[in-house]
Image (tube, helix red, strand yellow):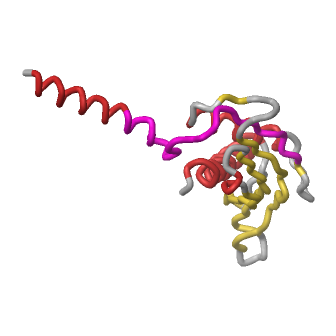
């Protein structure tokens, strides 16, 4: 009976210990308690008003939802900063009468990531993604919202993976 209790205790101890090393987001053990996301300026030649605020909030939300880190306005252990460098609409395919049958919105963001506790993880990198839509449509209203949702979801996840998940 005593051996059974001892074995049960060891199994529980190993199970609890392994939970602190890995979680379902793939972040593993993060040597930080706080993070900050500085406001991403929109430095693209073609400016869509408000996307810089939307992007900054999306990145903050993603990190808060997938980690136990606390958001702070200054002196974060992890710091994300950068700028939107490209917002471009370009035709992808044409019809027989030389009109765009499909357009592509591409957004690129330059990110500088700083980890105060582990400087080897610091990086500066460009992330970009695109959204294709019909050449007969205007990129406004719900179509623009959908495009930004798709693009920002991918870019923020790529930033998260590069900085915390190491995928």
The N terminus sits in image quarter: top left
Report the magenta stretch's main SS: loop
Nearest the eye: 161 or 4: 4
* In the depicted structure, whether residue 89 falls above or below residue 73: below
Q: Position of residue 23 (x, y in %)?
A: 45, 40
Say if residue 150 shows up in the picture.
no
Q: Is 30 colored magenta in this rendering?
A: yes
The C terminus sits in image quarter: bottom right
Name the side, left or right, on which 94 lies relative to 18: right
Q: Position of residue 39 (x, y in %)?
A: 84, 40
- Residue pictured at 75% horizontal, 42% vertical: 79
Nearest the eye: 109 or 146: 109
Name the side, left or right, on which 143 lies relative to 85: left
Say if residue 70 shows up in the picture.
yes
The residue segment tinted magenta is 17-41
Q: Position of residue 40 (x, y in %)?
A: 83, 45
- Residue pictured at 11% horizontal, 27% vertical: 3
Q: Position of residue 4 (x, y in %)?
A: 11, 26
Name the side, left or right, on which 137 lies relative to 165: right
* In the depicted structure, whether residue 93 falls above or below residue 74: below
Residue 100 occupies which quadrant of the picture? bottom right
- Residue pictured at 31% horizontal, 30% vertical: 13
């Amino acid at each position: 009976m005593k051996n059974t209790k001892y074995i049960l205790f060891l199994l529980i101890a190993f199970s609890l210990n392994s939970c602190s090393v890995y979680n379902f987001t793939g972040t593993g053990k993060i040597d930080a308690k706080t993070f900050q996301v500085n406001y991403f300026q929109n430095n693209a030649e073609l400016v869509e008003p408000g996307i810089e605020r939307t992007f900054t909030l999306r990145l903050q939300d993603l990190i808060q939802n997938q980690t136990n880190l606390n958001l702070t306005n200054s002196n974060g252990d992890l710091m994300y900063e950068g700028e939107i460098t490209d917002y471009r609409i370009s035709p992808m395919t044409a019809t027989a009468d030389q009109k765009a049958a499909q357009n592509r919105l591409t957004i690129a963001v330059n990110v500088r990531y700083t980890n105060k506790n582990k400087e080897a993880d610091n990086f500066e990198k460009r992330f970009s993604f695109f959204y294709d839509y019909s050449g007969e449509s205007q990129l406004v209203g719900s179509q623009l919202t959908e495009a930004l949702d798709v693009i920002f979801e991918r870019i923020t996840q790529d930033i998260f993976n590069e900085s915390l998940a190491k995928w």
